[in-house]
Image (cartoon, helix red, strand yellow):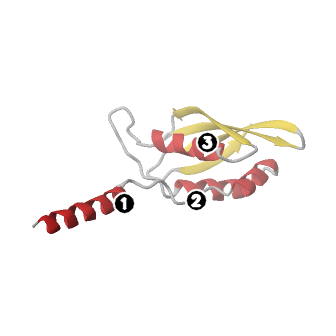
Amino acid sequence: MKTCIYLLSFLLIITIPNCEKESSETIIKCSELLSAFQSNDTLKIKSEIDTYLSELIPEPSLTDIEGHIENTVQLVKEINKCSGIKAELVCYACIYTYPSQSEIRVCFKNNGTETIRIMDILNSEKMKFIRIHE
């Protein structure tokens, strides 16, 4: 009986850490994203951002009907992991379309000059990159 209890305890210890919620497995390709920002390659920016966003699931609540505040914060954190790029959440769900959009400020150097752009992200069921502008 003791052997059975020890075996069961051992199996629980091994399997419990595997039950944690995993973050998105898709990682942004930083050098490609920086290059896309520098060359203003909207299609490449969209591809990199949408690939990351495709794995994120909304978690609606009473204070966040669309359920993407945490996903938006995670996107900003992921971009900030990239050397040469700084991202900051300007506002969440502040562009009153349906669904709403959020804005993320992105700073990077282009030929030695600091450049600032704003990314618009659609807060639909599946978040999507919409556009980048000054």
User: Upstream in the sequence, badge 2 or badge 3?
Assistant: 2
- Residue at the extreme front: 2
Q: Where is residue 84 in the image (x, y as percent from the top left)?
A: 76, 44
Q: Position of residue 22 (x, y in %)?
A: 43, 55
User: Upstream in the sequence, badge 1 or badge 2?
Assistant: 1
The residue carrying pointer 3 sits among few (fewer than 14), some (14 to 19) or many (20 or more) residues within 10 Å by Cα, namely many
Secondary element at tag 2: helix
The residue to which callout 1 is attached is 18
**Figure quadrant of residue 77:** top right
Marks 1 and 2 in Cβ contact (< 8 Å): no
Q: In this view, does 87 lie above or below 49?
A: above
Judged by depth in the image, the label closer to the viewer, 2 or 3, is 2
The residue carrying pointer 1 sits among few (fewer than 14), some (14 to 19) or many (20 or more) residues within 10 Å by Cα, namely few
Q: Which numbered circle lies on residue 51?
A: 2
Viewport quadrant of the C terminus: top right
Total tally of numbered discs in the picture: 3
